Amino acid sequence: MLKALSRRALFGALAATLTFGAGVAHANPATDFVNSFGGQLVSIVNSSKPLAEKKREVLPLLQSNVDIQGIARYCLGRYWRTATPAQQQKYLQLFDQVLVNTITDQIGNYQGVSFRVTGSTPTPDGERVNALIDRPGQPEVNMQLIIGGNPSKVVDMYGEGASLRMNQRGDYSSYLSRHGGDVGALNTALEHQLNNHH
């Protein structure tokens, strides 16, 4: 059975970006990017608009600030090269929907969050921006967003030391190895996941 995207990592990463609206003492391009992205998210989430309208507004913001296609291709790994162009296109469309649904479903849960940035570090994949996230009544969470590319985008998310891309790649690889490397079967499973989305 195909597992859903790592919700803990995604939710924590969304909390991180939602709460990065406050100033960072020693800004750099990566923290500037996260501040801008987070500020836009905060203005949507904290508005008095209905939840459905907030989700609609967050969708293009995520699509323009998160490297969804890059994350999707990484998650498919070596199977990207064996998929047909039609399967690749279908997979990218489905992954986009699954990722965005997973994040936007939780918008209403991120009110009253506070954070503090603990630093940023260069990595081979981009700048790792670290933050401690605090939600009322919840344990503090250490989150990292990897910012890379030109223009800057979120290229990976870490929660509790686990990479979203690595976790999902392992899940997809395991699924595909059980289904003869058939990306069409993975697409069918993703469609089923979306059809059962509430």
Image: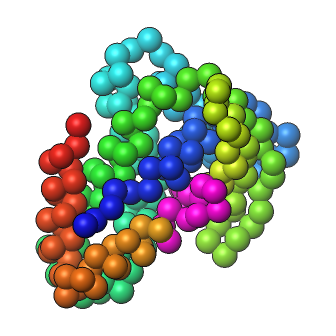
Q: In which quarter of the image is residue 51?
A: top left
Q: Where is residue 177 in the image (x, y as percent from the top left)?
A: 28, 85
Q: Compared with residue 49, is residue 35 higher up or lower down, i.e. above or below?
A: below
Residue 193's x, y, as percent? 22, 54
> What percent of the width, then of the height, locates residue 39?
60, 31
Q: On the image, which quarter does residue 117 sit in?
A: top right
Where 92 falls versus 80 (above or below)? above
Residue displayed at 16% across by 57% down: 191
Is residue 194 visible to us here?
A: yes
From the viewer's perspective, is 62 left or right of 22? left
Q: Quadrant of the N terminus?
A: bottom left
Q: Which of 88 and 106 is in front in this view?
A: 106
| Residue at left offset 42%, top offset 75% | 170
Taking 180 as reference, is 22 left or right?
Answer: right
**The residue positioned farthest toward the right in the image shown:** 25
> Is residue 76 positioned above or below 134 on the image?
below
Residue 147 visible (yes or no): no
Q: Where is residue 26 in the image (x, y as percent from the top left)?
A: 85, 46
Q: In this view, does 95 lie to the left or right of 30?
A: left
Protein image colouring:
rainbow
Q: Quick check: 40 above or below 6?
A: above
Task: Write the start and end of the magenta stretch as one range.
Answer: 149-166
Outermost top residue:
48
Count of numbered marks = 0
Relative to 124, 176 lies left or right? left
Q: In which quarter of the image is the C terminus?
A: top left
Q: Which residue is drawn at 62% across and 42% down?
A: 16
Q: Nearer the viewer, residue 150 or 139?
A: 139
Asked if the magenta segment contains residue 89, the reply would be no
| Residue displayed at 41% across by 73% down | 169
